[in-house]
Amino acid sequence: MKTTEIQMNNITDISETLLIPLYCRARETQSKNPLINDRKAVEITEKLNNVFATSTSPLHRRLAKGKLRRSANKKFTVFFAIRTRKFDRYCQEFLSRTPNGVIVELGCGLSSRFSRIDNGAVEWYDLDLPEVIAIRKQFFQETARSHMIASSVFDFQWMEQIAKTKNTILFIAEGLLMYLCEDDVKSLVLEIQHRFPGCELVCEVESEFIINVLKKERWRKKFQQDYHFGPDVTMHFGIQDGKDFEHWGQGIRFLDEWTIFDDHEKKLGWMNLFAFSKRLRKAQWIVHYQLQSL
Ligand SMILES: C[S@@+](CC[C@H](N)C(=O)[O-])C[C@H]1O[C@@H](n2cnc3c(N)ncnc32)[C@H](O)[C@@H]1O
């Protein structure tokens, strides 16, 4: 594909957040002793760089120059790579129990997880907003077992596309839920439970503490400026405890949780000290649930 052919139309501020984990995965893949291998992210970012170099968007121009964030660039890349590696491991562990399982990646952005995880039997669905799937289709192709769904998570019709499956389903959400409102996240989780009883959900969550900090204009602006995000990008949804989802209804079972610091990853360097602070350790973490039938 020629770089000039890449179209990124109507992408919202919220959807542009996908560029940060994408560039981090590419950067980590190209680093010494990489924690992940995401050649597809490298390929995509190289093509995007040619377009972004002359973009009117400060975020795009900075990305094209290799600047991912105003500070802590190197560790920050590692942070995202560890998160991605953990989501990969959750998928691999699910498929080791359920080789014919179904995995639905909600808010997939330009993730190439399917190619890393494919065991030859998994049925895979990548779901994101239509404008993101339009970009995604310029880099990925659907196959007999990997499908794309162009839909908001809140337009529950998308669930009909996977309703025919009899196999166990794992829903994953990496970097999605914090950008949504609590009532919406709750109705999404309850609808998934209602339609797919017995499924599992692995999702990244933000701490309520961070959400409250971001309610203050000064911190919200700092967050947006750090990443060169647009004014619509803010985080809304956070929890205090991994078990908080259980209070939303019967049958929501907390299975386990994991923080970035649990891997004691050497590449994280001084950031491993965050493990000793309750607030920083769980500023953002991953929670695993089973959504049982009522
Ligand atoms: C921070 S990005 C994460 C992308 C990807 N999971 C990754 O880690 O590379 C958030 C993603 O959520 C998607 N998103 C936001 N709101 C959504 C919605 N209502 N329905 C589906 N996807 C949504 C955005 O388009 C974006 O791709």
Image (cartoon, rainbow, N blue to C red):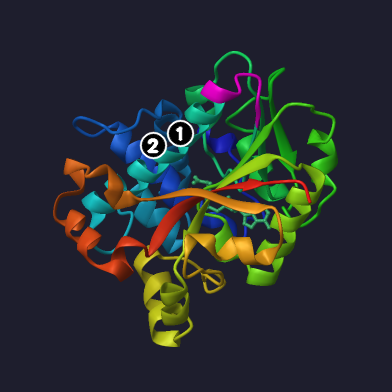
Q: Which mark is residue 181?
A: none
Residue 110 in the image, given as x and y percentages of width and height:
54, 40
Q: Residues within 10 Å of mark 1 (few under 14, many from 20)?
A: some
Please say if 142 is above or below 182: above
Is-magenta flag for residue 221?
no
Residue 157 in the image, given as x and y percentages of width and height:
85, 48
Per the rendered image, the range of residues in magenta is 96-102
Q: Given contact means CB atoms under 8 Å apart, are the residues at marks 2 and 1 in contact?
A: yes
Q: Residues within 10 Å of mark 2 (few under 14, many from 20)?
A: some
**Residue sticking out furthest to the top:** 120
Q: Amino acid at mark 1?
A: Asp
Q: Which residue is mark 1?
A: 88
Q: Which residue is mark 2?
A: 85
| For residue 39, side relative to residue 35 (left or right) | right
Of 21 and 262, which appears nearest the observer? Answer: 262
- How far apart in space, not on screen, are marks 2 and 1 (Cα)? 5 Å
Q: Is mark 2 within 8 Å of ligand 1?
A: no
